[in-house]
Image (cartoon, helix red, strand yellow):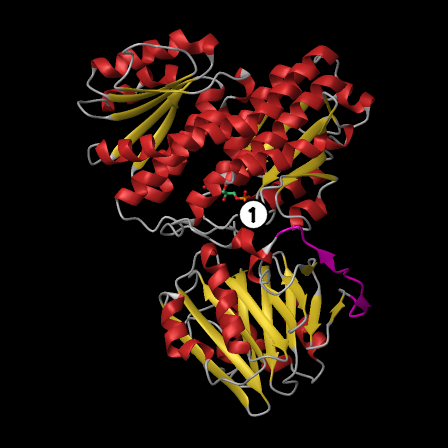
Amino acid sequence: MCGIVGYVGRQAAAPLLLQGLARLEYRGYDSAGVALLDGSGFCVYKEAGRLSVLAARMNGGEGLPQTVGIGHTRWATHGAPTARNAHPHLSDNGHWAVVHNGIIENEAVLRRTLREAGVVLRSDTDSELIAQLLQREDDGDVPSTLRRVTAQLEGSFALGVLYTAQPERVYAVRCQSPLVIGVADEGVFLASDIPAVLPYTQRCVMLQDGDVACLTAEGYTVYGADGEPLQRPLQETAWEAEQAERGAYAHFMLKEIHEQPEAVAATLLPHLQEGRVTPEVLPLTAAQAVALKRVVLVGCGSAYHAGMVGAQVMERLARVPCVAEVASEYRYRQPVTDGDTLVVCISQSGETADTLAALREAKRLGARVMAVANVEGSTLAAESEAVLLTRAGPEIAVATTKAYAAQLAALYLLAVRLGVMRGTVTPAEEQRLTAELRRLPSLIRGLLKTAPQMHALAKRLPPLTDAYFIGRGIDHAAALEASLKLKEISYIHSEAYAAGELKHGTISLMESGTFVAALACDKALLTKTLANVREVRARGAWVLLLTAETVEEAADEVLTIPAAEPLFQASLSIVPLQLLGYYTALERGCDIDHPRNLAKSVTVE
Ligand code: F6R
């Protein structure tokens, strides 16, 4: 999705804005632009395509002395990805410049009103309308002008705004789309997420919905919905700049796959003490835990897949009905929900629009709600009753790996704790399970050594058009994630099936050379899945089998996964399959960290 940066300080803004935009590239974009401001007005640069085109046009910012500016990477929604539609957009009188994330849902009405008033629009975007509205509502008092304009906007948005009459200020508005202020020695930064400001500062303010902020070289003021200044405290983020650097790795995705042992350890270890899961992971009293009627784990994409694993683990350990739900479906389904329902919203970014909508719906219905989130201070974290943080650090590659691994770890903690509270996990069992959890980081580290094997396999595989991932139970949940990893970065059509479901239709697609990855890490289900492997091989499929047992000649290639607690096996089987997805995409020459059409943080429905 789009990215916003802003800067006001003592240094030249242009190079800082370009660097900030580069750090937001991972969010996905198709054009970019920068507006610089000083006493003589705006200098605006906009280009379609990669940021490098814009940077070249601006000569990397060399010779541009302005110390105030805003920048934007655009992911087209209204209008083609052209320089004309790129942000910043100026008002007709040239007094206002706006960068915008999100979607203005009533843009058709606003466009008609402005046209009828004689305003000539220069782009196809909903964003330009905001600049024109600012001109119409301008009373010289910027926070109140911004309030009157945003009151006319429907939808979710974050804005960065410059005004020629106040050339030493950057304004920001947040409404359901994230914005961060970073306070550094060299000035004050604005960004749509934390990694953009990390090279300059770890001192951040997460703006909340309805906030209007004014940034100057000296600091910032935040105004609440009533127009009065309010306190938004500076927080010191634990994330460090080098965590958001690619280092020696060819891609962020490969780096993040290799960071999984640390991500899982950092998520688990603060909550494992003397063979127990610490109580604060779950915001329920003993009575509430016992009275619980159901648990719903909600998320999108990989977070939903983590929820599918978590639901199975939780139901088995806590003996309470648990289901995973796609967040975009949850809110429209009129789910049976009450105070004895726990809804766990899972999200790396904590800003995914559908997950936030599900959270709000669950709250409206009276459920207990908690978040499993990777970004402290994110909207999901702020709006939930309680947060269990995944401590994966900043995740830059669009395709999630370490955040998914950390989500699994967090859900295991919740499952064990809920089982203990409900009396379905005995103290001895808790001891054993927590010992198994402690083993996970080193087991994952061991599986990273399959990288050469997975690379060789990716090279050896015939040119694939389709792939199938099958498994039963938790293996099926892991198969869904493995399939998504391959599909989203290599553009190979891929599907995941419950292994027993295959013969109810999809087996008709099996023919000579069809690629099937079979996950059979749960010993109890091994013979059943092996039967399914035989079925597809009999029809010519080429099978990669992942198993924790020794099985001879059961498949074309067998990958032995170390035996661990079966409930936690998804954390292991996914690792070589992430690597397979990565190396397959590499062999196909795909843009691994920026897969086409995808965005890291999906802040629109
Ligand atoms: C896939 C992927 C996405 C995200 C999904 C939810 O690799 O990364 O499917 O998992 O967009 O994002 P978050 O976790 O930020 O809510």
Q: Main secondary structure of the magenta part?
A: loop
What x and y, as percent, mark residue 536? 26, 16
Q: Residue at the left extreme?
A: 512
- Which residue is more in the foreground, 163 or 192? 192
Q: Residue at the bottom extreme?
A: 40
User: In the drawing, does residue 25 fall left or right of residue 366?
Assistant: left
Residue 152 visible (yes or no) = no
Relative to 193, residue 408 above or below: above
User: In the drawing, does residue 301 fall left or right of residue 495?
Assistant: right
User: In the drawing, does residue 131 fall left or right of residue 590?
Assistant: right
What x and y, as percent, mark residue 586? 30, 44
The segment highlighted magenta reads 226-239
Q: Please name the residue shown 58% across and 76% down the image.
A: 133
What x and y, as percent, mark residue 568? 55, 22
Tell me if residue 22 is in the magenta stretch.
no
- Which residue is more in the foreground, 240 or 512? 240
- Mark 1 Cβ inside 8 Å of ligand 1: yes
Circle 1: element type: loop
Amino acid at dot 1: Thr
Identify the image quadrant of residue 345.
Answer: top right
Q: Please name the residue shown 66% across and 27% down the image.
A: 413
In the picture of the structure, the residue carrying the numbered disc 1 is: 352
Relative to 36, residue 465 above or below: above
Relative to 229, residue 602 above or below: above
